[in-house]
Image (spheres, rainbow, N blue to C red):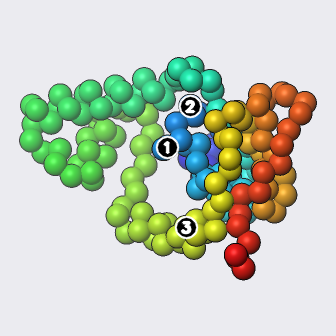
Amino acid sequence: MIQLLKKKFGERNVKKIIYFSDGAGSQYKNRFNFLNLLHHETDFDVRAEWHFFATAHGKGACDGIGGCVKKNAYRASLQDKTIVTTQKLFEWAQQFFKKIEFDFCTLDEYKSHEEYLKERFAVAKTINGTRAFHSFKPCKEDSLECKVFSNYLKSSVMKVIKSVKQ
């Protein structure tokens, strides 16, 4: 996604990405994503922060698009048995949805990223009380600024990385 944004708007024009999502701990609000947020600027050469909607809020266009793709792929697979692999699903989606850009990640690419992140995640530290916070911004090499609300004046600084010596 970041490569697409840089290509579309120019490398130097993409200076900061502000992520918004729901607060599902299993998907987004967890120590691994917080650690990735801490490394975002190093990984992508773009600063970032992450804000979470309140429970049951924040449905957006991507939720509708995802649902539409799933529904139509299911229907197409019932009519034509050729969508049996992820590659075939990707090819079908590109043909069926002309105005949506899809990207495909191979299993080898996935495994390569997984291996790269394994060492990083080994030092990830759980942030106590994350359910109460809705705004996370990198502020130090090993810490995030956490706020109850995005524009809340009072913040807490939470360390995200365990000491390697522990």
Q: Residue at x 89, y 33 (%)?
A: 154
**Residue 67, visible in the rendered structure:** yes
Residue 110 vertical position relative to residue 90 in the rendered view, above or below? below
Residue 56 vertical position relative to residue 7 in the rendered view, above or below? above
Q: Does the residue at mark 2 contact the one at mark 1 (Cβ under 8 Å)? A: yes
Residue 38 vertical position relative to residue 130 in the rendered view, above or below? below
Q: Residue at x 74, y 72 (%)?
A: 163
Which percent across, then down, holds residue 47?
Answer: 76, 50
The answer for how far apart the CA atoms under marks 2 and 1 are is: 9 Å
Which quadrant of the figure has residue 156? top right
Residue 135 vertical position relative to residue 87 in the rendered view, above or below? above
**Upstream in the sequence, badge 3 or badge 1?**
1
Which percent across, then down, holds residue 37?
Answer: 68, 52
Q: Which residue is mark 1?
A: 27
> Which amino acid is tagged 2?
Asp
- Label of residue 103 in the image: none
The answer for how far apart the CA atoms under marks 3 and 1 are is: 16 Å
Q: Residues within 10 Å of mark 3 (few under 14, many from 20)?
A: few
> Which amino acid is tagged 3?
Leu
> Which amino acid is tagged 1?
Gln
Q: How many marks?
A: 3
Q: Which residue is mark 2?
A: 22
Q: Residues within 10 Å of mark 1 (few under 14, many from 20)?
A: few
Which percent across, then down, holds residue 128?
Answer: 68, 47
Q: Does the residue at mark 3 contact the one at mark 1 (Cβ under 8 Å)? A: no
Q: Residue at x 24, y 33 (%)?
A: 73
Foreground residue among 79 and 134 = 134
Which percent across, then down, holds residue 40?
Answer: 69, 56
Foreground residue among 3 and 154 = 154
Secondary element type, mark 2: loop
121 left or right, relative to 37: left
94 left or right, relative to 142: left
